[in-house]
Amino acid sequence: MSSIALFICPVDPERSRVWFRLATADFARDDAQLRAFQDTIFLQDKPVLESQQPKRLPLDLRAELHTAADKASSFYRRHLEARGITFGVC
């Protein structure tokens, strides 16, 4: 069993610095194998994240197509807009 946590800090409105932690009960793999696993997971996501447009989070829900699975994201965007947050949003 493994758990991955991401800690994200905005650097500017379109870039963030990310730290992550992996907790695992997999004692069969050595450190090099665990690092290879981490690299596999994060390097698969990197091109997708870096190619997303727009770079800033649109607060207008009509700017993107949403499904029922996006309920938390929609709530978060309304929350940011209601509080007048402008950093990293469009």
Image (tube, rainbow, N blue to C red):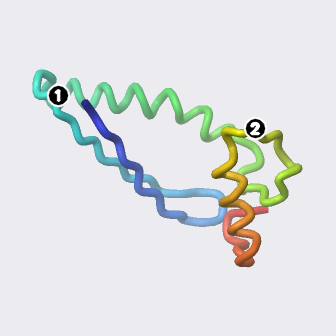
User: Residue 61 placed where, x, y %?
Assistant: 83, 53
For this view, does 7 lie left or right of residue 47?
Answer: left
Which quarter of the picture shows residue 50? Answer: top right
Q: Are marks 1 and 2 in contact (CB under 8 Å)?
A: no
The residue sitting at 66% across, 60% down in the picture is 76
For this view, does 67 lie left or right of residue 2?
Answer: right
The residue sitting at 24% across, 41% down in the picture is 23
Question: For the residue marked with disc 2, what is the amino acid?
Answer: Thr
User: Residue 10 placed where, x, y %?
Assistant: 54, 64
Name the residue nearer the viewer: 61 or 72.
72
Question: For the residue marked with disc 1, what is the amino acid?
Answer: Asp
Find disc 1 in the rendering and name its residue.
26
Q: Quadrant of the C terminus?
A: bottom right
Label 1 SS: loop
User: Residue 85 placed where, x, y %?
Assistant: 70, 74
Which quarter of the picture shows residue 48? Answer: top right
Q: Residue furthest bottom?
A: 84
Label 2 SS: loop
